Amino acid sequence: MARETKFHLANGVHRVLMKLSGERLGWRVIGMPVIELTTTGRKSGQPRSTMLTAPLSPGDGYVIVASRGGDPSHPDWFRNIEADPLVDVRTRTGTRHMVAKIASAEERATLWPEITARYPRYAQYQSKTEREIPVVILEPRH
């Protein structure tokens, strides 16, 4: 099975679990909060949603990681926010309009050790790929 198909299948299974449980289940995975990130497709202009873990949630925001399991290419959602950083984030408590900011080198240098200390799987993903896995900061729109 192609890797892309596996990602879509896993996302679909996650959504089914949430729906069947009346959204009581699925908002935490491996100790991390789960968010539904909706971006605008860079080619289609249509809304595109994906379920993601958020290893850090400072203040009113979230930090997410464009790991794609250590694949050599960035996930589609990351390429979408490069084109349009205005996103919607749905959590157990509702949907918020947010802006996605790719962490600068300095911000990543601070965030990455904290992320990998809490969730070593991200370090494993980084070891699988030559690309530097981006860290993305989601903040409320003002």
Image: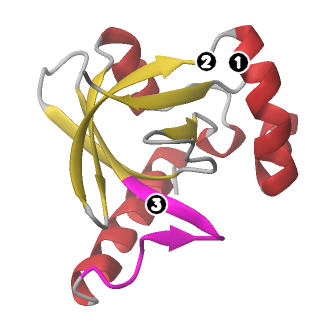
Which residue shows up at 21% across the image and 16% down it? Answer: 43
> Range of the magenta residues?
23-35
Mark seen at residue 103: 2
Q: CA distance from mark 2 to mark 1?
A: 5 Å
The residue lying furthest to the bottom in this view is: 21
Ranked by sequence position, the earlier of labels 3 and 1 is 3
Crowd tier of the residue under label 2, counting other residues whose Cα lies within 10 Å: few below 14, some 14–19, many 20 or above: some
What residue lies at 34% left-to-right and 81% top-to-bottom? 17
Percent across and percent down for residue 12 are 33, 65
- Left or right? Give the position of 113 relative to 92: right
**Residues at circles 2 and 1 in contact by the CB criterion of under 8 Å:** yes
Q: Earlier in the sequence, mark 2 or mark 3?
A: 3
Closer-to-camera residue (110/126): 110
Give the image location of residue 39, x and y in percent. 26, 31
Looking at the picture, does residue 57 appear above or below residue 141?
Answer: below
Q: Amino acid at mark 3?
A: Val
User: CA separation, marks 3 and 1?
Assistant: 22 Å
Question: What residue is pinned by disc 3?
Answer: 34
The local secondary structure at tag 3 comes to: strand
Would you name the residue on which mark 1 appears? 107
Q: Within the magenta stretch, is there residue 71?
A: no
- Label 1 neighbour load within 10 Å: few <14, some 14-19, many 20+: few
The image quadrant of residue 22 is bottom left
The part of the image, by quadrant, that contains residue 111 is: top right
Answer with the quarter of the image where residue 9 lies.
bottom left
Q: How many other residues sit within 10 Å of disc 3, few (<14), some (14-19) or many (≥20)?
A: many
Could you say where residue 57 lies in the image, as x and y percent from the top left? 55, 47
What residue is drawn where x is 31% and y is 78%? 18
Mark 2 residue type: Ala
